[in-house]
Amino acid sequence: MADSDMSIIKSRKASVTRTTRETDISVDINIDGEGLYEVNTGIGFFDHMLNGFARHGFMDLNVTTKGDTWVDGHHTVEDTGIVLGQAFLEALGDKKGIKRFGHCILPMDDALVMAAVDLSGRHYFEYDLPMDAPMVGDFDTELVKEFFYSFSDAAKINLHIKKINGNNAHHIIEATFKAVARAIDMAVALDERNKGVPSTKGVL
């Protein structure tokens, strides 16, 4: 790989903080990391999902969220999605040389989940992930949708998530986070054939 390509890789990092009356969040991301993570959101299952998101997306991720979890987990999960999306967009930069599109069909025991992504610079979100269980541990399963909506909106990406099979909510949710991470890892990869932005418009 050329030196110019390596410089692109080394620069794909960002740090973002956001403070409101409901949450105080800091995120550090390295898109071209090793899957290292340090996550503390105050919601154990959510931490576990973000750990898997980092590990299977091969991004280094530090997330610290202090939220009003005495109310419920909604603000913490939604706002973490916003800040993570902002950091991802900033780290991605001008998107020159990326593959842009990514997809994954990921199995986890009974669960089978499809995720597809387009780093288009335009937000669009489709979500079809029915689950029967209202809670997994201390995590409200409705918040999976809120997280990925917020992340995709802030990151300005097109994201589709669909459950193909599955009954166990833990497996379905974990398969989802891993599938999205793998799809993103595919989309952010650099393609040596692509000398510019992968769009006929010239910008993303």
Image (cartoon, grey):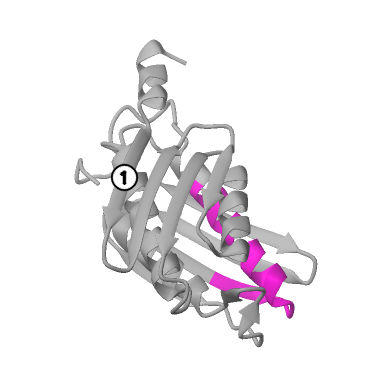
Mark 1, Cα crowd under 10 Å, few <14 / some 14-19 / many 20+, is some
Q: Residue at x 72, y 62 (%)?
A: 107
Q: Residue at x 57, y 78 (%)?
A: 141
Specify whether residue 91 is painted magenta. no
90 vs 41: above or below = above
* Left or right position of 203 against 117: left
| 94 and 170: which is toward the camera | 170
Q: Position of residue 10 (x, y in %)?
A: 40, 23
| 65 and 136: which is toward the camera | 65
Q: Residue at x 35, y 26 (%)?
A: 11
Question: Which kind of residue does numbered mark 1 sit on?
Answer: Val
Q: Position of residue 163 (x, y in %)?
A: 61, 74
Q: Tally the marks.
A: 1
Instruction: Answer with the quarter of the image where residue 155 lies.
Output: bottom left
Instruction: Answer with the quarter of the image where residue 202 lies.
Output: top left
* Left or right position of 175 against 196: right
Q: Position of residue 98 (x, y in %)?
A: 39, 37
| Residue labelled with disc 1 | 16
Q: Residue at x 47, y 76 (%)?
A: 70
Specify whether residue 181 is painted magenta. yes
The secondary structure that dominates the magenta segment is helix
SS for callout 1: strand
Report the residue that reaches farthest toward the right.
Answer: 109
Q: Position of residue 131 (x, y in %)?
A: 63, 83
10 vs 152: above or below = above
- Identify the magenta region: 162-184
203 vs 191: above or below = below
Is any atom of residue 41 visible in this view?
A: yes
